[in-house]
Image (cartoon, helix red, strand yellow):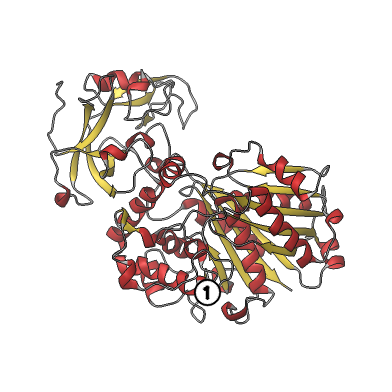
Amino acid sequence: MFQWFGKINYSPFTKVGAFADHLKDGRLMGSRCTACGTTSFPPRADCEECMSGDFEFQEISGRAVLHTFTKIVAAPTGFEDVTPYIVGVVDLEEGGRALAWFGETIAEEEIRIGMELQVVPRIFEESEEIKVYYSLDRPGTSWSKV
Amino acid sequence: MKGRVGIIGIGHGVFGRRSDATVQELAFEAFRSALQDAGIERDAVDASVIGSVPEYHKQRSLAGVVQEYLGLNPKPTWLTEVACASGSAAMRTAWMSIKAGVHDVVAVIGCQKMTELSTPEILALMGRVGEVQWESVFGTTFPAYYALFAKRHMHEFGTTREQLIEVAVKNHYYGARNPYALFRKEITLEKALVSEEVATPLQVYDCCANADGAACVILASEERARALSSNTVWLDGMGSATASMSVLRRPNLTGLPSAEAAAAEAYRMAGISAADVKVADVHDCFTIAEIMAYEDLSFCAKGEGGPFIADRQTYIGGKVAVNVDGGLKAKGHPIGATGVSMTCEIAKQLRGEAGERQVPDADVGLTHNVGGIGQYCFVQILRRD
């Protein structure tokens, strides 16, 4: 159910749609090509190395290092109510990168490129429909179902 | 075909909030002045290529309405789209059609109306030039992507806020002297540094403005150019490359690999190096973009783009004059028109017709037009005989 992923979801139908089901249950999944073993985050169904279409999900630790970040003050349509928000790009321990919002465990003044972070599965609590995402939080922050 | 492809006519409309005109009316202004500049009749044009980003217009399939309004039916036309580099993609396909021997004279028209949409709508549209599956879901915007580049560049190379803003100060200085520019006024470093935040560290004065506008270039085969024109500027290097849609899959976030690759191809094709370039129009959609362009085009070493502008090396009289028409920053950025506008400006410089903005002894020029956040890049080398 990939339409669960994101405040606004622009691509509800994808071969890696089960990513959002896992995220809802607190698991952050990358992909692994079952033909050649190449891993990817974000996950992809079709291997960029050997072009095989056979893949499986593989849970990743979420441990990461901050690569760069920005505080978005001028927001696009649909995000005005959460403005301003801070977006970071992290290098994941298992390879690949993720882009996400900072969570509440980190104050704006503490944010430094190179700091260690944890990518944490999240559910939008204020939303009536199921909406999931992940956040950048203090190392050791664990997912908890509210 | 072995022959060269030449620019025999250029035409440029005024960029800005053009509530007085439709997009085809803007295209007409540029086309008419390019024909006049070339000194040819409309009948001499074999085909047109339109560079524009369709999402901004209510009219679907824009090339058709432009072709009709220009009075070019039944000659062929088609649209090219690669975000903010759509104009240079039109240049490239027109150049290819002449190189292939299919057409002899082709009109390239970049045109765009943007100001009929609100700023949040444009932010949403442009943000989705980032990857939508894994990035736009977090409300990324176009300035935010360049802010991510800026933060990392500052972290790795010590680039400063002041150095970024110096780019805007320079481009406004020259924009004030360009009759086609949207912002015809100089700005100060002090004033720019207290402007509103957009996406940290970028503030309003780090960002180019959405605009309406059109520009036109008439290209001809070498044989036709020599017969029709006495001041042809030659397109001697045409580089084009891509990079991943997603910033999550880039080798680094301090430059654009597409720009490096396109520049290498263009330099090789023209048989020149960066040191030969006297004047350049580069894609300064944000101040950091111009600093990365200095590095990607090898005007300076990697990481030295900040000091390069601070030392005024890109003013007229410096190592290479960059964006002395005001750049996207001061000229405005009607996205489909921008690439064609760059080619017009550099051709004007090589013809010695840039007035008080003229770069002395300009014999080799360059354009660098980026689509999206570097997913696409086109580099042209222009030369006069």
- The residue at 38%/20% (across/down) is A17
Can residue B5 be seen from the camera position used here? no
Which element is circle 1 on?
Answer: strand
Q: Quadrant of residue B338?
A: bottom right
Sort mark 1 into few (<14), some (14-19) or many (20+) by Cα contacts within 10 Å. many
Q: Quadrant of residue B384?
A: bottom right
**Residue placed most toward the observer, B292 or B29:** B29
Considering only vertical position in the picture, is A69 above or below A56? below
Where does label 1 land, which residue? B321
Considering only vertical position in the picture, is A86 above or below B210? above
Q: Position of residue B149 (x, y in %)?
A: 36, 53
Q: Quadrant of the C terminus of chain B?
A: bottom right
Q: Position of residue B65 (x, y in %)?
A: 71, 42
Q: Residue furthest front?
A: B20
Considering only vertical position in the picture, is A4 above or below B110? above
Can residue B138 be seen from the camera position used here? yes
- The residue at 37%/74% (across/down) is B310
Position of B269 with respect to B317 (left or right) is: right
Kind of residue sitting beneath label 1:
Ala
Position of B216 with respect to A41 (left or right) is: right
- The residue at 36%/32% (across/down) is A42
Considering only vertical position in the picture, is A43 above or below A139? above
